Image (tube, rainbow, N blue to C red):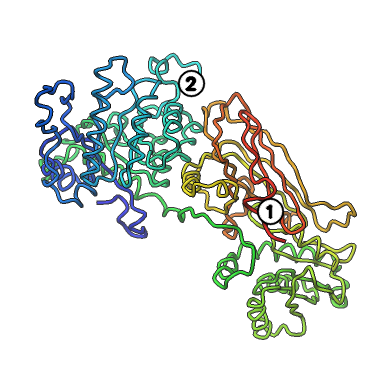
């Protein structure tokens, strides 16, 4: 039964737990024992008798030879093969061996087993760990196979190890950082989206920072050996706090768990009252513990999705979503209230009327927040609501009528850039911010609108700053790569960043302040940034940059999505993602240098970006050829 079939969880959010088995030529019995009796969801089972070697088959019998697979495809229904079996490619194969016979046998066997798995309609096959640090021939053969696959996924088995720099472990001589092995292999296989990782989780784990890298990689399974489990006070298996946290992270990223190995916990005494003990699967207590870890998690965040930034008139459903974000409007109300108190002293509250303009009023949430701030501070207000979307203006008119605001609120159905205001405003309020702060033309719109503002007037927001940080994001990269064109690699995406590894703290990029009455005002910007990976992280692959913003609405009232200062429980903005055409490998001892430009033309605004170190990348989006925002 899936680990997540329980109250409050969608079936699609379930996670599954498999079990690694030995070769069996009686697959129905294998499934009956591990799935029906044991309660596991699938078996990770060898498809070929491990004693088989092509070179040992007599040459003259080759044409009539029946390959020693684990029984006929007819012993199970196609749906059972597909749902309950993940094929395990023979672990003896070594495609980079110096021994030519072994190398040729390995290549033949690999191709035969994958062909059989495809014939069975299996969803996935587990490839054995490369035997040495050189895996070029293995990767070449796998890449050849990948070109012909449509549905079958290949999981490359990689041990989860990274020794410290001064470690003298025997293993560290062979494999200092297993991420390097995975990275070499996937680069040789051209980042194929059908190639994923199955991580062997050991009893000792690398540093927290090092583990974080894997959250941005395409990890499909975590294989946990029974040796990695500790024993609790009742004699049952459990995991260390660090292992629990790692597993929670894996569950959160849709990674399946596989239990591997022989039972090492003798729990018959602990459960001798259990009359069904003789029927109990020897690994059932490990499965129960994994299920317990999953079930105590909170429901998962919504799945990441790519969205293109907004440009024209919004639909009603979009307004609905934004208006439900009460946190944002509470912050705006606080900012307007502070500005009103600063603008009008208490003794003049009954005589002075503050003129407030909402530019980009939408369906009225900022108008409501401003009027609530006036009521809260006991200040008199006159509001101009400027909105260019004629559909939103209809709703706005109805709202004003319904609330009885006709004497206070004047609705202007016009683009703020072309409106001639009858008087100047004390306060100018807008919500034109994008995920990157200035990416929805807030600077251009507010520069145009500030002609309505008194010279000592207040703009809310008063400033905003964009931020970026380098990320590993295999899933996003493969989604973009699937389009097979340059334009998608030169487009910024507003996206729920879920399956990513954040590799270094974010840094500020561009800042805009309002009002800006300078005669030399210019919204073009350029910034060079330098990022350093933490020393214990190990190397990582940068697929692009996550972008955020932080905004000062007024004085100490702020709003933003930059991770370290993000406004809690706000969902109006997801981060933005700037991809790299070719991912850049970065090491802790060599900084990542990146350049960002904000460019302005007569009819559009766009970004250009490039990496100059450790290896130069091409310039992205030159002249806004692929992605821009129209003025």
Position of 563 with respect to 188 (left or right) is right
Q: Crowdedness of circle 1 by 10 Å Cα count: few (<14), some, many (20+)?
A: many
Residue 240 place in picture, x, y as percent: 38, 34
Look at mark 1 in the image and give the residue it sits on.
437
Judge depth for marks 1 and 2 and give the one in front. Answer: 1
Residue 131 place in picture, x, y as percent: 33, 22
Q: Which residue sits at x=30%, y=32%?
A: 127
Q: Which residue sits at x=86%, y=64%?
A: 457
Choose between 40 and 263: the one closer to the eye.
40
Residue 609 appears in which quarter of the rendering? top right
Q: Crowdedness of circle 2 by 10 Å Cα count: few (<14), some, many (20+)?
A: some
Residue 109 appears in which quarter of the rendering? top left
Q: Which mark is residue 164?
A: 2
Q: Which element is circle 2 on?
A: loop
Q: CA distance from mark 1 to mark 2?
A: 40 Å
Choose between 136 and 261: the one closer to the eye.
136
Judge whether residue 529 can be spotted in this image: yes
Position of 467 with respect to 513 (left or right) is left
Position of 173 with respect to 401 (left or right) is left
Q: Which residue sits at x=64%, y=33%?
A: 531
Quadrant showing the C terminus: bottom right
Choose between 558 and 349: the one closer to the eye.
558
Judge whether residue 554 can be spotted in this image: no
Position of 6 with respect to 299 (left or right) is left
């Amino acid at each position: 039964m899936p680990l997540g079939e329980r109250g409050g969880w969608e079936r699609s959010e379930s996670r599954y737990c498999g079990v690694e088995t030995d070769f069996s030529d009686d697959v129905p019995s294998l499934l009956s024992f591990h799935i029906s009796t044991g309660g596991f969801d699938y078996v990770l089972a060898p498809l070929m008798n491990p004693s088989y070697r092509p070179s040992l088959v007599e040459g003259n019998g080759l044409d009539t030879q029946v390959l020693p697979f684990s029984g006929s495809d007819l012993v199970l229904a196609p749906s059972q093969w597909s749902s309950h079996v993940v094929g395990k490619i023979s672990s003896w194969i070594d495609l980079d061996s110096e021994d030519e016979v072994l190398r040729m046998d390995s290549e033949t066997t690999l191709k035969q087993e994958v062909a059989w798995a495809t014939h069975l309609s299996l969803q996935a096959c587990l490839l054995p760990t490369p035997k040495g640090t050189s895996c070029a021939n293995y990767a070449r053969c796998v890449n050849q196979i990948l070109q012909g696959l449509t549905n079958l996924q290949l999981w490359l088995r990689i041990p989860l190890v990274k020794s410290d720099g001064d470690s003298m472990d025997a293993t560290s001589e062979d494999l200092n950082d297993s991420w390097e092995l995975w990275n070499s292999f996937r680069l040789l296989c051209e980042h194929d989206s059908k190639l994923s990782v199955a991580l062997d989780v050991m009893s000792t784990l690398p540093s927290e920072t090092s583990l974080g890298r894997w959250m941005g990689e395409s990890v499909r399974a975590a294989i946990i050996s029974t040796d990695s489990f500790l024993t609790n006070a009742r004699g049952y298996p459990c995991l260390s706090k660090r292992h629990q946290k790692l597993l929670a992270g894996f569950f959160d990223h849709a990674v399946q768990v596989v239990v591997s190995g022989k039972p090492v916990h003798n729990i018959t005494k602990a459960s001798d009252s259990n009359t069904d003990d003789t029927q109990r699967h020897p690994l059932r207590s490990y499965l129960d513990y994994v299920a317990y870890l999953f079930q105590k998690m909170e429901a998962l965040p919504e799945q990441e999705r790519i969205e293109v930034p907004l440009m024209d008139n919004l639909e009603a459903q979009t307004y609905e979503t934004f208006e439900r974000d009460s946190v944002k409007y509470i912050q705006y109300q606080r900012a307007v209230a502070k500005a009103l108190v600063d603008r009008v002293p208490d003794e003049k509250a009954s005589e002075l009327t503050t003129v407030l303009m909402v530019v980009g009023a939408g369906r009225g949430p900022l108008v409501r927040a401003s009027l609530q701030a006036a009521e809260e501070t006991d200040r008199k207000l006159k509001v101009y609501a400027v909105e260019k979307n004629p559909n939103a203006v209809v709703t706005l008119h109805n709202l004003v009528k319904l609330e009885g605001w006709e004497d206070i609120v004047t609705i202007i159905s016009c683009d703020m850039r072309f409106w001639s205001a009858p008087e100047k405003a004390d306060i100018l309020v807008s919500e034109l911010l994008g995920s990157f702060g200035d990416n929805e033309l807030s600077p251009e719109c507010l520069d145009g609108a500030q002609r309505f503002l008194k010279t000592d007037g207040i703009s809310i927001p008063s400033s905003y700053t964009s931020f970026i940080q380098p990320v590993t994001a295999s899933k996003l990269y493969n989604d973009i790569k699937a389009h097979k064109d340059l334009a998608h690699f030169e487009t910024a995406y507003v996206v729920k960043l879920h399956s990513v590894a954040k590799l270094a703290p974010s840094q500020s990029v561009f800042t805009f302040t309002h009002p800006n009455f300078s005669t030399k005002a210019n919204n073009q910007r350029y910034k060079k940034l330098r990022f350093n990976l933490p020393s214990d992280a190990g190397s990582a692959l940068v697929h692009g940059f996550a972008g955020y913003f932080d905004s000062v609405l007024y004085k100490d009232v702020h709003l933003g999505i930059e991770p370290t200062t993000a406004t809690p429980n706000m969902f109006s903005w997801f981060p933005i993602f700037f991809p790299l055409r070719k991912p850049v490998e970065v090491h802790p001892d060599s900084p990542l240098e990146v350049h960002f430009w904000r460019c302005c033309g007569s009819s559009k605004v766009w970004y250009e970006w490039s990496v100059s170190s450790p290896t130069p990348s091409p310039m992205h989006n030159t002249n806004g050829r692929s992605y821009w925002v129209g003025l």
